[in-house]
Amino acid sequence: MPKFANISGRNAVKAFLKSGYKHVHTSGDHAILQKSGCPSLSIPLHKEIAPFLLKSQVKRAGLNGNEYLKLLKQRS
């Protein structure tokens, strides 16, 4: 799996939104994302997300690391 380093919470959320997730609400400093037929995701809106946490959320979303990195690099 590729390296997930120096990715902010806001950029992580943007990539999940591109994969079909919807931002439902924000609870504290976490964005709650939902997609029909998939588990909900809770993404911390920190300057940098811990790589192990991001990897687990990518896996929960049913994506592989390379697909997620492509979503990160796409322009809106």
Image (tube, helix red, strand yellow):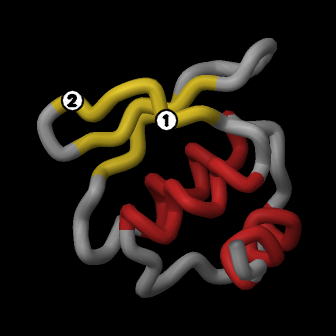
- Residue 18 appears in which quarter of the rendering? bottom right
Amino acid type, mark 1:
His
Quarter of the image for residue 20 reads top right
Above-or-below relation of 20 to 7: above
Q: Residue at x 64, y 82 (%)?
A: 3
Q: Is residue 31 above or below residue 65?
A: above
Picture layout, residue 66 above or below residue 28 = below
Q: Which residue is mark 1?
A: 23
Task: Tell me the element at label 1.
Answer: strand
> Mark 1 packing: few (<14 Cα in 10 Å), some, or many (20+)?
some
Residue 50 appears left or right of 4: left
From the image, state whether disc 2 or disc 1 is nearer to you.
1
Q: Could you say where residue 9 lies in the image, as x and y percent from the top left?
A: 38, 63
Amino acid bearing label 2: Ser
Judge from the rendering whether residue 26 lies leftward or rightward of residue 36; answer left or right.
left
SS of the residue under disc 2: strand
- Locate residue 66 relative to residue 30 in the image: left or right: right
Q: Count up the numbered dots.
A: 2
Q: Nearer the viewer, residue 69 or 73?
A: 73
x and y percent of residue 68 in the render? 76, 64
- Which residue appears farthest toward the top when viewing the image? 37
Name the residue: 27% across, 41% down.
30
Percent of width and height locating residue 14: 56, 60
Q: Where residue 31 appears, x then y in whole percent? A: 35, 40
